[in-house]
Image (cartoon, rainbow, N blue to C red):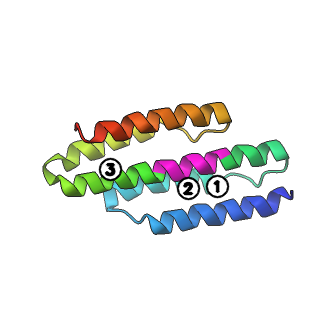
Amino acid sequence: MRPKIVWQELLEEARAAMLRKMLDTGFAELATADYNTFVRQSVPTTEAESLRRQNQMTGLGSKINAISNADNEAAKRPESAGRILAATREFCSRQILPATSHELDLFSANLSDFLAGLSRI
């Protein structure tokens, strides 16, 4: 596997995910922060670095979907939109993009808890 080619494919996939998930301003800001962090990384030069980027890409896609879900929930319940945005910001500030499969598992568990809690906000 050629890391530079895989990296370029991951960047394009991340960009496409962002374009598909264009969100309202407050939520979009949260999605673009991690996207920008992801794409500013150097091109991976080893298989291990490529694997880390793939884990990060999986986490990024999941995080963008969670932000999109929060955005949709806020649109359904405008009276709670500010609290939902605040909870989403807090969640995003605690969740770095996972680099290992173990971190990805923990990230997924935290993500599930966050999504389950949206309806209670």
Under tag 3, what secondary structure? helix
Residue 80: mark: none
Amino acid type of the residue that numbered disc 2 sits on in the rendered structure? Asn
Image: 90 above or below 45: above
Which residues, given as a range, are shown in magenta? 55-63
Which residue bears the numbered disc 1? Answer: 40
Name the spot of residue 3 as percent of width and height, x first: 82, 56
The residue drawn where x is 54% and y is 55% is 35
Q: Tell me the quarter of the picture where residue 71 sits.
A: bottom left
Q: Is residue 82 left or right of residue 46?
A: left
Label 1 amino acid?
A: Arg
For residue 48, what is the image quadrant?
A: top right
- At 68% from the left and 51% from the top, the residue drawn is 41
Residue 54 lies, in percent from the top left, at 68, 49
Q: Residue furthest left?
A: 79
Mark 1 vs mark 3: in front: 3
- Give amino acid for label 3: Ala
Helix, strand or loop under label 2: helix
